[in-house]
Image (cartoon, helix red, strand yellow):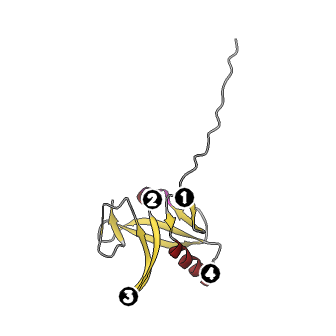
Amino acid sequence: MQTETQTTTPVADVLPAFITVTEAAATKIKELLAEEGKAESGLRVFVQGGGCSGFQYGLMIEEAGAGVGDQSFESNGVKLFVDPVSISYLKGAEVDFVDTITGGGFTIKNPNATSTCGCGQSFNA
């Protein structure tokens, strides 16, 4: 007697955007990419050891696209690339650009941070 063998095809999960970029940050990122002639590039967002609180954020232009194991997202027209280690620390984070009288810069609002330092560039999770 023969039995039927069922094969299942894995269904791709639709993942929410793990990291978002505000409109202000997207505008600034697009300006910077255009100035450097890299309009088709994206932004790599990462976490590395260091800083006052144990981890620090990093942002850099990524011309090569997604690397092995990277997650890629798009938010407000900006391509984002995140390595597999950083993604666990950055889930739900928001990249913003703040322009004040004393200067401007990118900030990351991270719901996973249990504490941050005074400069806002490092955190503990």
Which of these two is toward me, 75 or 10? 75
Which residue position holds label 1? Answer: 70
Which of these two is toward me, 7 or 95? 95
> Magenta stretch?
83-88
Question: Quadrant location of residue 86?
Answer: bottom left
| Labelled disc at residue 34 | 4
- Residue lying furthest bottom in this view? 101
Which residue position holds label 2? Answer: 92
The reply to whether callout 3 and callout 4 are in contact (CB within 8 Å) is no
Question: Quadrant location of residue 79?
Answer: bottom right
Q: How many angstroms separate mark 4 from mark 1 (CA)?
A: 24 Å
The disc, 1 or 3, on the residue closer to the chain's N-terminal end is 1
Describe the element under mark 3 as helix, strand or loop. loop
Quadrant where the N terminus lies?
Answer: top right
Tell us which disc is closer to us: 2 or 1.
2
The reply to whether callout 2 and callout 1 are in contact (CB within 8 Å) is no
| Labelled disc at residue 102 | 3
Q: Residues within 10 Å of mark 1 (few under 14, many from 20)?
A: some
Taking the spot 36% from the left edge, 73% from the top edge, the residue there is 121
Tell us which disc is closer to us: 2 or 4.
2
Quadrant where the C terminus lies?
Answer: bottom left
